[in-house]
Amino acid sequence: MKTIPKVGLAEVQAAAEWIADDWDCESVEAVRIKSGLVEIRGLVGNPLDEHFPYDFDSQGWALPIGRNPWGREISIPLKDLSGIKIAGMPGYGKTMLQLGFLGRLTNSPAVQFCLFDGKTSDPRYGDWGQVAGRAMFVVGDNPETAHQRLTELVRLIKDRPAQLVEERGTHKFWKHGPTETIPLVPVLMDECHNYIDASGLRGKDKDLIESNQRLMRTVAKEGRGLGVLPIVATQKQTSDAIPTSVRDQLEVGICFPVFTMDGAEAALGSGIRKDEANDPTAMVDKDNPGVCVVTGVPGLSGRYDRVRVGDVDENH
């Protein structure tokens, strides 16, 4: 639809329910294609209600998220990606999404995982224990152990430019991409606030957490061009749980249902306050978990999209 003065995208979105009734559709969605042009689609069903398994046979350096309301596959290209932040209440799909990430990459010998499981004291019995054999290491919720591993990761980052130049003649990791000798290192940090939230701490405990914050900041700021990819998940990405100096370095935002708009904004940016259709606080529905709001992926141009994540058979 070509726009006219005083009738543009906002007006079409405001009239979406009327259009859906007139077209006999489940819903109508509109997006701005370019200046003066709006695309309107009527959805007979709701793709966000349809479950599907992740496809782990696809090739290429990208992580699957799922399908948007128009049935389009949404994924995250990994080349030069600074990182991913994931927010949302328990039971809505954060772990399933991260298992999908692992499933896509785990068969490649050019990938080596680092796993921080902040939900359990003994990672053997947590969500990530079943893939421990595929990881460089798996850490439980002990911030001191996490500090040791984060120190190793920072050392890897500091040493990698010399290794890249010696082996490839360039310090730019993605010019040739991951290899067995210099692999991609996804750093999955589930419930990361257990390692970097200093609220209410004093003395040595506070010093330890602040040191973890500095180390994580280095991973977030310097890992992008060197093949170290932070994927940071927590129930809310607000500054009391994760420092903004870390959070704001991670370009892809994913938010499952949350109760507060502050939590949604921390994960997705301030623009989400103006996007009523994609408001994560309106998605709190235990009858249909597995839907998130995404930003920072190709094709969105800073906008937001809702996505149904895939299903993972954990016994496969």
Image (tube, rainbow, N blue to C red):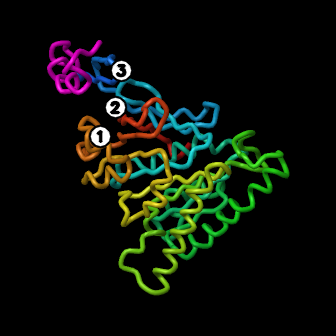
- Amino acid type indicated by mark 1: Asn
N-term-proximal mark, 3 vs 1: 3
User: What's the CA distance linking mark 3 and mark 1?
Assistant: 36 Å
Residue segment shown in magenta: 1-25
Residue 66: give x, y in percent of width and height. 45, 34
- Amino acid type indicated by mark 2: Leu
Q: Do the residues under discs 3 and 1 have CB atoms within 8 angstroms?
A: no
Residue 300: give x, y in percent of width and height. 42, 32
Residue 48: which numbered mark, if any? 2
Tag 1 secondary structure: loop
Name the front one of labels 3 and 2. 3
Figure quadrant of residue 247? bottom left
Q: Name the residue under label 1.
A: 288
Q: Is residue 89 left or right of residue 253?
A: left
Q: Name the residue under label 3.
A: 35
Q: In this view, does 166 lie to the left or right of 186?
A: right
- Amino acid type indicated by mark 3: Ser
Q: In this view, does 190 lie above or below 1?
A: below
Tag 3 secondary structure: loop
N-term-proximal mark, 2 vs 1: 2
Q: Do the residues under discs 2 and 1 have CB atoms within 8 angstroms?
A: yes
Tag 2 secondary structure: helix
Q: In this view, does 15 lie above or below 236?
A: above
Q: Is residue 26 above or below residue 143?
A: above
N-term-proximal mark, 3 vs 2: 3
The quarter of the picture where the N terminus appears is: top left
Figure quadrant of residue 242? bottom left
Residue 83: which numbered mark, if any? none
Category of crowding for the residue at label 2, using alpha-carbon neighbours closer than 10 angstroms: few (below 14), some (14–19), many (at least 20): many
